[in-house]
Image: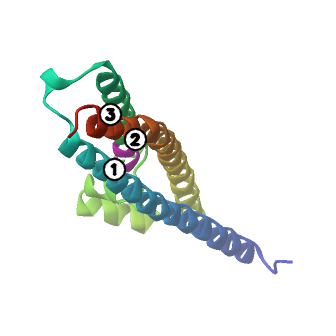
């Protein structure tokens, strides 16, 4: 299949680069979904905030529904924010990761480039791929929690609006 060891190494480098790029593309997909959930959550709370009567007019139904809505909102927003939190530290000095490069001097970066060969480049790509895969998995775990949070927020949010509009006449 491969004519030489170099061909095999080049194949592996290409495969690792494509895998890393696909993982990085998933970060963009996560961010698009997070932005949508963020906007919906803020809009829901904004709408509710315009209808909530002064605290002395609250009854138990309003209080319970608003508390449930706020708790779900906090869960949603917290997990969204944890998901978009940038990760800028790396366990190794990689010239492929901006966080590592930013902490090195120009001479250190140059030395790493000067000492690199195709095998060390492959090792660096594979390490970055693994690190990015871990980050993407965490981001999507947080997104899943956010989606559960906004789903749980919907019913108490609707009840809060109903109670504020009908029971208080707001």
How crowded is the residue under tag 2: few (<14 C-alpha within 10 Å), some, or many (20+)? some
Q: Which residues are magenta?
A: 78-85
Residue under label 2: 158
For the residue labelled by badge 2, is the local secondary structure a helix, a strand or a loop? helix
Of residue 114 and residue 16, the one placed in the foreground of this image is 16
Lower position in the chain sequence, tag 3 or tag 2: 2
Find disc 3 in the rendering and name its residue.
Answer: 163
Callout 3: SS? helix
Q: Quadrant of the C terminus?
A: top left
Work out whether 24 lies above or below 63.
below
| Circle 1 crowding by C-alpha within 10 Å: few under 14, some 14–19, many from 20 | few
User: From what the image shows, is residue 140 above or below residue 63?
Assistant: below
Contact, CB < 8 Å: mark 3 with mark 2? no
Q: Residue at x 50, y 53 (%)?
A: 132
Sequence-earlier tag: 2 or 1 = 1
Q: Secondary structure at mark 1?
A: loop
Q: Earlier in the sequence, mark 1 or mark 3?
A: 1
Give the spatial CA distance, label 1 vs label 3: 40 Å
Observer-side mark, 1 or 3, equals 3
Mark 2 and mark 1: Cα distance apart in space = 34 Å
Observer-nearest residue: 59 or 46?
A: 59
Judge from the rendering whether residue 150 lies leftward or rightward of residue 85; answer left or right: right
Residue 114, percent from left and from top:
41, 68
Instruction: Choose mark 2 or mark 1, whichever is in front.
Output: 2
| Residues at circles 2 and 1 in contact by the CB criterion of under 8 Å | no
């Amino acid at each position: 299949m491969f004519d030489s060891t170099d061909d095999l190494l080049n194949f592996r480098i290409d495969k690792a680069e494509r895998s890393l790029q696909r993982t990085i593309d998933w970060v963009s997909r996560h961010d698009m979904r997070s932005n949508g959930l963020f906007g919906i959550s803020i809009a829901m709370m904004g709408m509710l905030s315009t209808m909530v009567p002064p605290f002395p007019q609250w009854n138990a139904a309003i209080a319970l529904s608003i508390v449930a809505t706020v708790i779900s909102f906090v869960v949603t927003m917290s997990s969204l924010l944890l998901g978009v939190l940038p990760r800028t530290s790396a366990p190794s000095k990689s010239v492929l990761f901006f966080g590592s490069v930013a902490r090195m001097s120009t001479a250190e970066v140059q030395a790493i480039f000067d000492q690199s060969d195709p095998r060390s480049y492959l090792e660096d790509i594979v390490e970055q791929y693994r690190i990015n895969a871990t980050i993407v998995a965490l981001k999507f775990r947080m997104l899943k929690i956010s989606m559960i949070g906004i789903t749980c927020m919907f019913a108490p949010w609707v009840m809060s609006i109903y109670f504020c509009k009908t029971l208080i006449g707001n």
